[in-house]
Image (spheres, grey):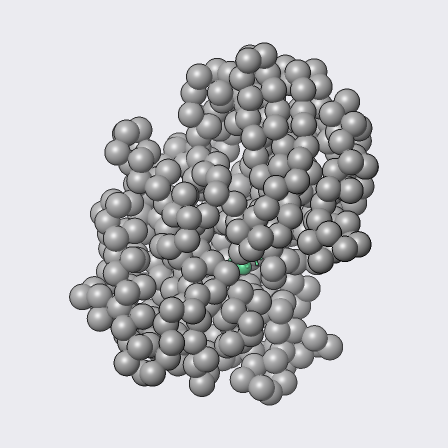
Amino acid sequence: MTRGAGLIADCHLWQALDSRGDPTVAATIEIGSASGTALAPAGASAGSHEALFLRDGGSAYGGRAVADHIARVQERVRAAVIGVDAADPWAVDGALRALDGDDRLADIGGHVGTAVSIAAWLAAASAQGVAPWQLLVGATARPPTLPLPMVNIVSGGAHAAGIIDIQDVLCVPVGAGSFAEAIEWCSRVRAGTRAVLAEAGFATALIADEGGLAAPFASDDDAIAAVVEGIARAGLQPGSDVAVALDVAATECFAGGQYRMAGQRVSSPEFVDRIRQWRQRYPLVSIEDGAAEDDDEGWALLAELRPETQVLGDDRYVTSPQRVLRGIERGEANAVLIKPNQAGTLARALDAIVAASGAGWASVVSARSGETEETWLADLAVGTGAGQIKVGSTMRSERTAKWNRLLWLEQTAGLPYAGRAALARG
Ligand code: 2PG
Ligand code: MG
């Protein structure tokens, strides 16, 4: 990362809209004649340990506005970052955290931290005349690669009005030889699954937050089985060409020490046992948030799914290097989801990738269910050599913006494709 190429001359915060039509924080950073703009994404199934997303309340946008919050912090944030080296994410992080003082950025908010730190990175890349991913090379000591995609096919949980318990059934094109082939296969699987659902009498024009199909399946099992059938319908081999991943988002199913599953209340061992059965029945290569964020018993049981399966933590680690290191000590998982706005700054997300790869864990760079039309997430995955990316479906522009950026980089940047080797093992 080339530093010292430009000090922040100005920082402007403004209210923008995300893909759900909810207000979010945008930041524009200026360095001489160059500038960078970034919008913070927002989650629906947010973990309780994430950096905070502070909204105004009141009447504008049904209480979801952020304009008053921006007015409250704008001048202090501006004063804190002016003069800081935009090409140094840790310097930007230090300035913001010195201003806030709280680990979850309770004063300025994780949305402000995310927008400002990403905008600084983009402004620095623009000032240096390089692509954003190039500025990150070396930050994680991993070589840049085009990531293996993990693509949402069927949605439930908080992304589809609780239509099924689990949040996402995704496909992973493990047999594809290039990023372009991988995305084409996922698109075919979506079409194949859509055909399977239509034949079963479901309305398939209704889509969920991330562009996934959303149907009132009788059970989670039926949803997973439909995607496996969709893979075959696409003319691909379930397992060897295209495997399946789940985001159980178990925190959303957990209350009072028990899980809600299929209308019943079950214990941690029963819940994890259900996941184990799914793994026996279906070609599952990755299971995200198979237990709730603070359910230590559940996570200890999930550990037994390794080494064959990628055990991936989202709400459990909230892109925090400290939480990742604790998970490594416990030996409970082998992969971490990387969402910059959970961490609150770019630097902390980079540190989480470094912590993970130090122990041989995989990293999956991830969008949020409330996304934006921006493409920097693709550059983050490439420049950090994270190896995997999760963005949602193969449709809706806030999703395809990232896929299109990766398709372009595959055409022009001469980068290797990470492929199935990026999945966690161990
Ligand atoms: C997740 C994300 C993205 P949200 O749980 O992994 O799918 O969802 O942004 O709602 O937290
Ligand atoms: Mg998740």
Vertical side of 8 occupied by 359: above or below: below
The residue furthest left is 235
Residue 22 position within the rendered picture, expressed as x and y whole percent measured from the top left? 62, 52
Q: Residue at x 32, y 83 (%)?
A: 200
State left or right for residue 282 relative to residue 59: left
Residue 252 visible to an observer of this rendering: yes
Q: Quadrant of ligand 2?
A: bottom right
Vertical side of 126 occupied by 276: above or below: below
State left or right for residue 76 relative to residue 17: right
Residue 348 position within the rendered picture, expressed as x and y whole percent measured from the top left? 62, 38
Quadrant of the snapshot with the C terminus = bottom left
State left or right for residue 141 relative to residue 171: right
Residue 325 position within the rendered picture, expressed as x and y whole percent measured from the top left? 62, 48
Q: Residue at x 71, y 28 (%)?
A: 94
Q: Residue at x 48, y 36 (%)?
A: 376
Residue 138 visible to an observer of this rendering: no
Total marks shown come to 0
Residue 197 position within the rendered picture, expressed as x and y whole percent measured from the top left? 33, 77
Q: Where on the picture, by quarter, is residue 89? A: top right
Q: Residue at x 69, y 43 (%)?
A: 110
Q: Nearer the viewer, residue 30 or 1?
A: 30
